Image: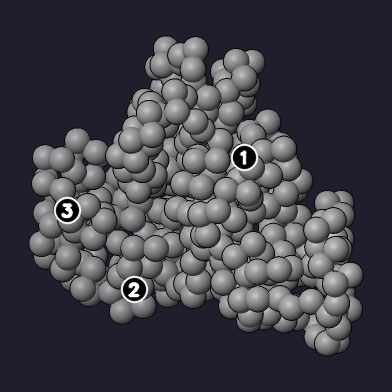
Amino acid sequence: METGSKQGLSTRSVHAGEVRYNEYGSVTTPIVQTSTFIFKNVEEIRKLAQGAAGRFEYGRYGHPTQVAAEGKLAAIEDAEDAVLFSSGMSAITTALFALLKSGDHIIITDDAYKRTLDFCRSCLNRFQIECTVVRMCDYEAMERTIKPNTRLFFSESPTNPYLNIMDLERLVSLFKPRGILIISDSTFATPYNQRPLEYGIDLVVHSATKYLGGHNDLLSGVVLGKKELTAPIREYLKITGGVIDPNSAYLLIRGIKTFELRMQRLNENGQAVAEYLERHPKVLRVYYPGLPSHPHHDVAKRQMKGYGAVVTFEVKEDIDYVLDFLSRLTIVNIGPSLGGVESLITHPATISYYDKTRTERLELGIKDGLIRFAVGVENVEDIIADIDQALAKAG
């Protein structure tokens, strides 16, 4: 179903991308669980060769449930096209491989997701693609790093775990006049809170596993932007095979239908929890873009509709104390992800960076007392009460 961008976000979230009257009369998009699509006759083969819409050949090249999900995602991001993948990292790695060639140079910020940094540092250089890591939000350093062969700039906003915010207007003014592509991973912001394409960012990436799916039950990633940039990425996907399976695509469609409702609640809960933690005597510091104390609050206020549901905070530098605090939680679950309806809390030093020494962690800004809290949609009074009792009892 074609759904115009002038319609409300929830209307697009519910209806966009789907066939209104499918052949089964199903109100929901069917899960087309097949690896191969057969032809009724040779005329259908000719139609496929001529690029007929809605005609499929083999599951790795695309399937109806995937196409419906892509249409829905493009509509809520106001993008010309969306390419769906089996995970967020598949979306990132495929996009970079599709857009880069040997001899190119890319710039990435130091506050990017650790696996994205690992890929740029450890994999791209094997293909003679140079990667320079610059300090997040150091725009002067970014400009100094630009080379004649710089092809692409990659960053996130907000970042993990400190929720730093890139000034999108400044990024565009810095890189676009030089013909350098800009990719923004907007997973933490979501299309509800931030619209990078409207600022001139070339491509937006989301780990759809998080807020878009919204229920901690699927893996997916998406790249969105103009077709001239997504087309080579889609072709590369057909080669590398990171296609989303029909069942996950269906779950993503279902999750997106309540996207706006969930984000409204998550923004409210995130703000309330951040304000509570900032007042708590056992909490040393809170990182949340919705707080005036955040270093990028003014930028976030200018370019974001809401501030999301991830709140990072620091307690005393004692791993045993942090683990005792986590063990006393009764509603909030301990887990490394975010964006679902359930509240999840994680201790980066022992969960995400367990393979690093303490010195290595500190160099990355991962302190022993750092905690990342992905607030869910539970009643915020209950969330706060759970955190409060755990902080009170931890010793």
Task: State whether residue 137 appears in this view.
Answer: no
The residue to which callout 1 is attached is 203
Disc on res. 355: 3
- The image shows residue 161 at horizontal and vertical percentages of 36, 47
- The image shows residue 12 at horizontal and vertical percentages of 78, 62
Position of 363 with respect to 148 (left or right) is left
Task: Give residue 126's quadrant in the image.
Answer: top left
**Cβ–Cβ under 8 Å for marks 1 and 3:** no
Q: Residue at x 72, y 81 (%)?
A: 30
The residue to which callout 2 is attached is 333
The first of marks 1 and 3 along the sequence is 1
The amino acid type of the residue labelled 2 equals: Asn
Determine the CA span between mark 3 and mark 2.
22 Å
Disc on res. 170: none
Viewer-nearest residue: 167 or 312: 167
Where 322 sits versus 287, above or below? below
Determine the CA span between mark 1 and mark 2.
33 Å
Q: Please, what secondary structure does the residue beneath circle 3 have?
A: loop
- The image shows residue 310 at horizontal and vertical percentages of 44, 55
Mark 1 neighbour class, 10 Å CA radius: few under 14, some 14 to 19, many 20 or more:
many
Where 321 sits versus 127, above or below? below
Position of 371 with respect to 129 (left or right) is left
Q: Residue at x 74, y 78 (%)?
A: 38
Viewer-side label of 3, 2: 3
Where 54 sits versus 270, above or below? below
Task: Tell me the quadrant of the picture where the N terminus can be found.
Answer: bottom right
